[in-house]
Image: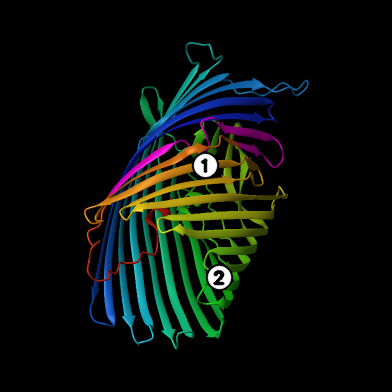
Amino acid sequence: MSGSYGENETLDRTYSEFRNSGYSLDSEDRGRITSRNIRELLSLVYKINDRHSIGLGGQIFMGASDPSNTVHTTSAGLAWGDVPPQMPEAGYTLYRYGGTLYNRQYQGSLNYIFRFDTLGSRLSFKADYLHQNVDRNYDYDTRDFSRPEDAEPFSTELRRERYKLLGHLFASRLDLNKNFSEERSFSAGLSYDLRYADNNAPVHRFEEEEWIPDPKMSTWFIDRTQSTGAYTQWADAYGKFSYQAGLRLQWDRIAYRNAENTGYEHRDYWRLFPELSLAYTFNPEKGTNINLDLYRSSGRLPDNNALSPRRVWQSQYSYTVGNENLEPGWGYDIDLSYTLRNKLTISYGGTWSRGSETMTFYDPDDPNIVYTTKVNGEHGSAHNIWIDYTTLVTKWFRVKSFIHGYWYRREVDGDWQASYSAGGGMFSLSLMFQPHPSMIIYLDGGVELPQKRLETWQNSYWALAAGITKSFCKDKLYISLDVNNILSTKLKKETVRWDNSYYSVLRQPRGHRSLRLVFSIGYRFNRNAKKSVSTVQTLRDPEEILK
């Protein structure tokens, strides 16, 4: 069992220019959120005999948060010659939003393993089922003033959203692993995943002393995505040289339904994913080797939020929305790595891929509002270099450092026909101390160079974090305290629409990420078991399934 409690305050300042309309917006957003969660995990494995074993697992996650934000926005005209600005009626707007968010997840897992020879060959089956229930109750209060100094607003709009997500996810795998020797093996398997998410977000507005439905702002959307795959793999070795070759056939179906459709709309994708891995070990005892991987990557299917047409408002003048026509991405990849004595690893990765890109658009009903959404047609290449070095200085002191450099060029097809290229990198250093067997202290720091996408640019940032974990009662009870973002950079993020008609810059004066304290406590029931303990394997992380 584990749990956490945290409080966080944010301060965002955003300046935006609507260049076609000839006016600007200057806003300040102050936010506060209190969050808490608890997680309980149970894993039971029964060994029927030397060949057969079965495992059952369960996990419960309960989370809640209470966010609240207040946004002050003023508008002004831009100097565009003799063209008068088409400004909003409000010279000053006070915008408040917040409420409660509850997230409940229940997960059950089943594992079965059949070992059918003495070489480690096995037939295994794994299945997961997860149910998620999310309630997001938000209230929105917008007050428009002609001038900032006015005492009373000339208009007031009150809205409330009662968003509810009911999600189900089933994931299963059947794997056959046949070992002919220590070096030679054959693998084959099947997989099936189903994601079902019912998103219902009714919105009401307050008019004439009563709450009335707002069908234009309300959304109802069901996401039913399926994925089925079959794979085969062959691995062998000759002396210091080894290889692995495989092929995966995958069928994906993205299906959805909304208030405008009487039935489900769906798109099917049949794809082949070959892979080839080559390795040569120079010194098996010291861990020195070189590896080459060639494969076609599948990319992740669009998640529920990326597909849903529900509007998620960032301010009264901007929101994000999903795109139900998003397609899965894919790519061709090459990875080359060299490891020296299990301490130093130098790697190169190249990819030629196709996916989606986030772009900015104007609201069709109000040109004073912009929204962002992902679009298909993004493609290009990327090249990466990684250097990873880990060493144990003493028995109680470990150092781990990591360097990453990259360069990429991307293009986006469509009416906009845009392209961009950029390079960057990052460096991180982790220090771990263990002054006592029951205590671990760590210190992590890192820096990342500026990041660029098609319409966005973000400044470089660096951060520092630390933590301590102490165990008691023969390592059964443990308590940990993590301090994140002890030092961090002030964020600056610029957005320039591809046609240069919209510009915004976001600044966070309090730092890229605010200081956060996380306190955790847990208890391990089987910590001191005399025999080795098996645990049930899950196929999905609950927090990553239905975002």
**Residue shown at 54% from the left, 15% from the top:** 148
Mark identifier at residue 72: none
Cα separation between marks 2 and 1 = 43 Å
Q: Earlier in the sequence, mark 2 or mark 1?
A: 2
| Magenta-span inclusion, residue 193 | no
218 vs 392: above or below: above
Residue 295, located in which quarter of the rendered image? Answer: bottom right
**Residue shown at 45% from the left, 56% from the top:** 398
Task: Say which amino acid is labelled 2.
Answer: Trp
Give the mark toward the camera: 2 or 1.
1
Q: Which residues are magenta?
A: 493-521
Q: Position of residue 74 (x, y in %)?
A: 57, 21
The reply to whether residue 139 is in sight is no
171 vs 358: above or below: below
The reply to whether residue 320 is in sight is yes
Residue 224, located in which quarter of the rendered image? Answer: bottom left
Q: Position of residue 505 (x, y in %)?
A: 62, 33
Q: Position of residue 122 (x, y in %)?
A: 37, 81
**Residue shown at 31% from the left, 65% from the top:** 109
Q: Is residue 7 left or right of residue 240?
A: left
User: SS class of the residue under badge 2?
Assistant: strand
Q: Residues within 10 Å of mark 2 (few under 14, many from 20)?
A: few
Q: Position of residue 316 (x, y in %)?
A: 52, 30
Mark identifier at residue 463: 1
User: SS class of the residue under badge 1?
Assistant: strand
- The image's colour scheme reads rainbow
Please give the residue where the numbered disc 2 appears in the rendered image: 270
